[in-house]
Amino acid sequence: MCGIVGAVAQRDVADILVEGLKRLEYRGYDSAGVAVINNNNELLTTKRLGKVQELAQALEQQPVTGGTGIAHTRWATHGVPSEVNAHPHVSNNTIAVVHNGIIENHQTLRSQLQGLGYEFLSQTDTEVITHLVHHELKTSDTLLSAVQKTVKQLEGAYGTVVMDSRDQDNIIVARSGSPLVIGYGLGENFIASDIMALLPVTRKFSYLEEGDVAQISRFKVSIFDTNGEPVEREAKDANVSHDSGDKGEYRHYMLKETYEQPTAIRNSLEGRLVNGMLDINTFGEGADEIFKNVEHVQIIACGTSYHSGMVARYWLEELAGVSCNIEIASEFRYRKSFVPKNSLLVTISQSGETADTLAALRLAKEIGYQSSLVICNVPGSSLVRESDLAFMTKAGAEIGVASTKAFTTQLVGLLMMTVAIGQHHGMSDEKQTEITQSLMSLPAKLDEVLALASSIEDLAEDFADKHHALFLGRGDQYPIAMEGALKLKEISYIHAEAYAAGELKHGPLALIDAEMPVIVVAPKNDLIEKLKSNVEEVRARGGLMYVFADSDANFASDDTMKVINVPVCDDIIAPIVYTLPLQLLSYYVAIIKGTDVDQPRNLAKSVTVE
Ligand code: M6R
């Protein structure tokens, strides 16, 4: 979603701001803009519809100079994507504002401000902040105090940065519901919505907490909490590679991240298995005590992360003997739910900032969940900071909007969690060892799967002219079928649905014809004979099938079926192994269709609004 970068420095900051925006492009956006204060205390604003590159070109043709500036990539919520609606928004040629989030009471504020004579140029909710700050400044000594008064009147979510052309020395930032991180330099300081934006200029960061307002100048950062009291927010060095934002030899981030999975999983396992046994401290302090008391697990997540949670439910109930429910965060947060005794709330999120998942975690604390654990890829993110325990997936930065390595490392974390909880519910040492050994065999197994890429690329040709596809799986492969369908629809724009294969005859069988390719995930397991019956049901209706199966499953290609041989693997890790061919299939279909693989239309990487 929207991205923010800001800087207070002695050098010209326009290039730093634009580079920061480029590094946030992966989040998804439709327009971009920058504003700097020049030496004559003038506000110079440039905005463009479309890619950051358009903005960069505009700035090349008409450069702006100045050491204090803010920049933004916008993902439209209120008002169409357009230059007028792009940020920064400006009031009276002095106050400039960028904002992530949604101001829910913007209509009321807009009417009040119009009554005071303010003229609105855009359709955005953000513009109310701009005029409100301008208005409050009339009765405030400082910009800081005007912003503090302004945010008290805002309802909804914001991460916002404000500057005043008459004050080159400071920018004011405020956070409530949308993350902001301060970057510390030498004689210069920065703000961004994501550390990725600032990696070329600093490695030292501190996250603002909910309700914080901060004044950032070149040599000083002053942070105030929701009551206006000065507070310290610990600054830490980021353990992220500068180059994690580069595509390297790969054509797209998604492909790079797909190929990174063996390494990502190695990193995820490293140091967590001691002599083949799980080190419980990997989940954080007090994890053993918490897991000991767990009688029920409630998993909450969205999108791809929801699918990994669905797999975990099979594992928790079958391997750990603990009851488990899973629900989509946006549903969970708006219904009254029953909380079983000694329940652990598990949230799963690549970004750690998904608005609905965060709201669900906060709700869970109010309604009696005993404790919480997050499976997450971003250290220091809101979900990590607000959960009792955290398993960091260590997948490395994931830039492609379509989640790949974050998903498979989430599954690794969830399998480790199953062992950690299972230890207290009678899981034998042999079973624990079997699971950890399977986990350790994963990276090599995934390398074998990646070697199938060229045959999957050939297969993708068959999908180029199709408008629909059906994915089928059973048991813990049903969520993998769902994940396969999500990947295909989000990057190739082909409508895809997943069904538990046993549901076929309850409706979807009516859709089967030669125009509806059916993708079947079919490792040899206890359900394979049942699945084969479902395959026959499709065949009998003239359906065309693409079956991902190991040699033990005994499928053979014929006129109605193409079989892609996946390496034989342990049942436990099969959901992870079978994910990769489906990722590759969607990738190659998207390539043929010529879509924007890394930034599919209408989507954002980190969904920080509900
Ligand atoms: O950051 P999160 O894991 O919480 O994000 C949840 C979903 O928005 C995300 O998984 C989304 O579905 C991806 N685009 C899937 O590829």
Image: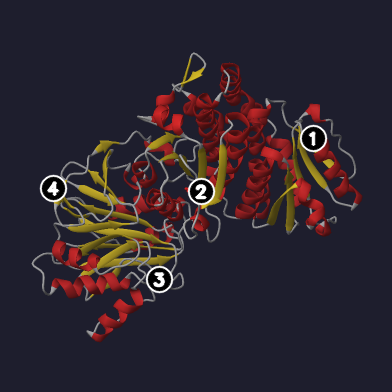
The residue that disc 1 covers is 528
4 or 1: tag closer to the N-terminus? 4
**What amino acid is at disc 4?**
Lys
Please identify, in this view, whether the residue under mark 4 or under mark 2 is nearer the observer.
2
User: Is the residue under label 2 in contact with that under label 3 (CB below 8 Å)?
Assistant: no
The image position of residue 293, as x and y in percent, is 45, 32
Quickly name the residue at label 4: 220
Q: Amino acid at mark 3?
A: Glu
Which mark sits nearer the N-terminus, 1 or 2? 2
Mark pair 3, 2: CA separation: 34 Å
Q: Position of residue 256 (x, y in %)?
A: 54, 38
Task: State left or right for residue 140 relative to residue 512.
Answer: left
Q: What amino acid does circle 2 point to? A: Ala
Dot 2 corresponds to which residue?
Answer: 301
| Residue assigned mark 3 | 83
Say above or below: 540 vs 262: below
Please name the residue shown 86% across and 37% down the image.
557
Q: Which residue is nearer to you in this view: 475 or 220?
A: 475
Left or right, 244 with respect to 539, comes to left
Asked if the beta carbon under badge 4 is closer than 8 A to the nearest atom of ligand 1, the reply is: no
- Label 2 environment density (alpha carbons within 10 Å; few <14, some 14–19, many ≥20): many
